[in-house]
Image (cartoon, rainbow, N blue to C red):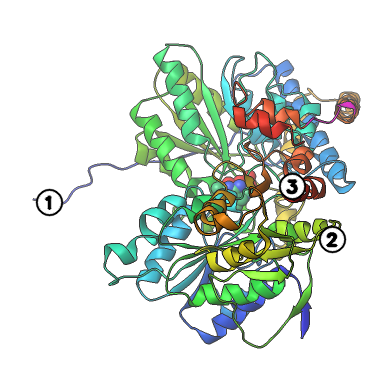
Amino acid sequence: MARLNVVQAINLALRQEMRKDKRLIVLGEDVGKSGGVFRATDGLQEEFGEDRVVDTPLSEVGIVGTSIGLAVNGMRPVAEIQFSGFLYSAYDQITTHAARIRTRSRGRFTCPIVIRSPYGGGVRALELHCESQEAILAHTPGIKVVIPSRPYDAKGLLISAIRDPDPVVFLEPMRVYRAIKEEVPEEEYTVPLGKADVIKKGTDLTVISWGAMMKYTREALEKADYNAEIIDVRTISPLDSETIINSVKKTGRCLIVHEAPRTCGFGAEIIAQINEKAFLHLEAPVERVTGFDVPFPMYKLENYYLPDERRILKGVEKVMKF
Amino acid sequence: MPEETIKSFNVGYLQVLDDEGHADKDLMPELSPGQIKELYELMVLIRAFDDKAFKLQRQGRLGTYLQVKGQEASEVGAAYALKKGDWIFPSGRDVGVLITRGHPMHMLLQYRGGDERGMKAPEGLDNFPITIPVSTHIPICTGAAWASKMRREDVVHMAFFGDGATSRADFHEGLNFAGIFKVPAVFVCENNGYAISLPRARQTAAETLAQKAFAYGFEGIQVDGNDIFAVYSAASRAVAKARKGDGPTLIECVTYRIEGHSTSDDDSRYRTKQEVEEWRKKDPVDRLEKYMKKNKILTDEYKQSVTQKTRDMVEKAVEDYEKVPPPEAADFFANTYAQPTEQLKEQMKEL
Ligand SMILES: Cc1ncc(C[n+]2csc(CCOP(=O)(O)OP(=O)(O)O)c2C)c(N)n1
């Protein structure tokens, strides 16, 4: 077994699925000859040729729109949007078509596409190269939203996303693209969509996060005086409510950490579900440590914006000392 | 009934200065020796800035930087055709446009150093901030130009973007509105051969980018983008036309990006050294120098003094940049809305 980082795990998943399924094509800006700006598609064009690994014009609407067309006519496109900040224009195609084709045609046409995109901050990037849009996407019935936090899951979740009969937006946490290495089996395996991962059992409180924040939340909790149960959500939509509710029923306390802005962030939905299903088990209000309600700042200020150890531990204290 | 041609278009191409620095007298725009020196000094300054910014990035003193080397004639020639009071809408690479338009260099470094305060245009300069999402500023330029037209102001608006930008809807929608509402705008497309790794041929099957304007009911022209006189000439004509109320123009400057796409790009993956070397021979600064020498506008002493002066200016900018105190987190809370919301006031306490 090889120790891979997230980018390499994604590359491996794409390569193996392309070998198995001739309908699978990869398309996007700079994905072919240059192998992607993060090298996620490195070497794929050499192996599968220019017809299956396609460098497109600079057009997010074109990439997503044609992917939808390819998908409704029998292909399995995996589109790359170079940074999730450039997904906004394509959101029209995603919400008005990808998400609705099944409904609109009563299943006569379907849209099995995957839209991969690096997302999130913390890498000293330019403006609009740091967005976290999982809540906006999750608010679109008809699409699934998946966020791996580590290499093993990146491979297994991406394969599930590719094989899923419905459109999936697959957000890849840029900040941990190369920051985590772990054993990733060469053999085929999948990680199911819609299943959260309890990455550590605990009794004092439940801490929920996803994406790059998972790593930093975990590290912060090592310094906490409490035995936290830690949940990696992995699939934002559909949410694995059961795992979350069972954990909160057990611990009675919950902290959610995400880097997207607080107002209408996905944490709000999780809190609503806890209120609906575990209210009487709560010993403290559910706490959120999140990004602020501001456009993601340029990098000199990003460390103030991103939830850090100090804010996470403060959140833990608040939940525990209530 | 016979089929007939009901409309056809001709796409012009303008070159004034050849690779050897000979200017075509009939095509030469009206420029005094003093003005030619000014253009030259700007181009040399931008090159010095660009080289320095690249080095600063390599030393970890600056964030991601997009080099403009090779495109100085396109940037200076177009922006120089504007008056104070006109507007510009630059994209990520266009430090040359911003320097020509008087944006302080230390602030450009500040911006590239991850401090958004560096993008705040000084009072009196209508420099719209750099736009990162490719082509999205084009309809905004159209809208701003429309406002000037509604108020009958003598103001021209100029947007800058690359060849890649012409693939996105924003470009087409922005130009379409500009044509219909006949706004005083000039669209400058710097076709530098690439959009990151993708060659210009991947952006459109059309032979030129200039011809796209005709679909929106106005003129497009292609110029040699490494020829400062051609760019300036086309731009000043387009600006004059806009001022007269005769509507927009698209100018395609055919140029070349000599360095990688950005400081994090490895261009050996998608183009050959020979290709880059061929373009180095068409260098816009060298070409203007040759012309100036032939026409006795440039002496060795003058050249030296310009090199020295521009280097000093850049060094001073670096010094000023590194003296700027870092921004405080309150900065982003203060600048999101005119008045911080209740939510923001509460969140501020978490810092
Ligand atoms: C909408 C959008 N998609 C993708 C990107 C990522 N990106 C940054 S620059 C660039 C290429 C731009 O090419 P071009 O418009 O020709 O301008 P150039 O960089 O050559 O000056 C790309 C793809 C972006 N900034 N915005």
Residue at image position (63%, 67%) is A33
* Tag 2 and tag 3 share a subunit: yes
Give the image quarter of residue A35.
bottom right
| Discs 3, 1: same chain | no
Residue at x 37%, y 31% (from the top left corner):
B179
Secondary structure beneath disc 3? Answer: helix
Residue A178 in view = yes
Question: What's drawn in magenta, residue-wise?
Answer: B323-328
Q: Is mark 1 within 8 Å of ligand 1?
A: no
- For the C terminus of chain B, which image quadrant? top right
Dot 2 corresponds to which residue? A222
Q: Amino acid at mark 2?
A: Glu
What secondary structure predominates along the stretch shown in magenta?
Answer: loop
Q: Which chain is indicated by disc 2?
A: A
For disc 1, the marked residue is B2
In this rendering, the answer to whether A282 lies above or below B311 is below
Where in the figure is residue B290, as x and y percent of width and height? 76, 34
Residue B324 belongs to magenta span: yes
Residue B24, percent from left and from top: 60, 31
Task: Find disc 3 in the rendering and name its residue.
Answer: A315
Q: Whole-Å distance between the Cαs marked 3 and 1?
A: 79 Å
Relative to residue B9, is residue B115 drawn left or right? right
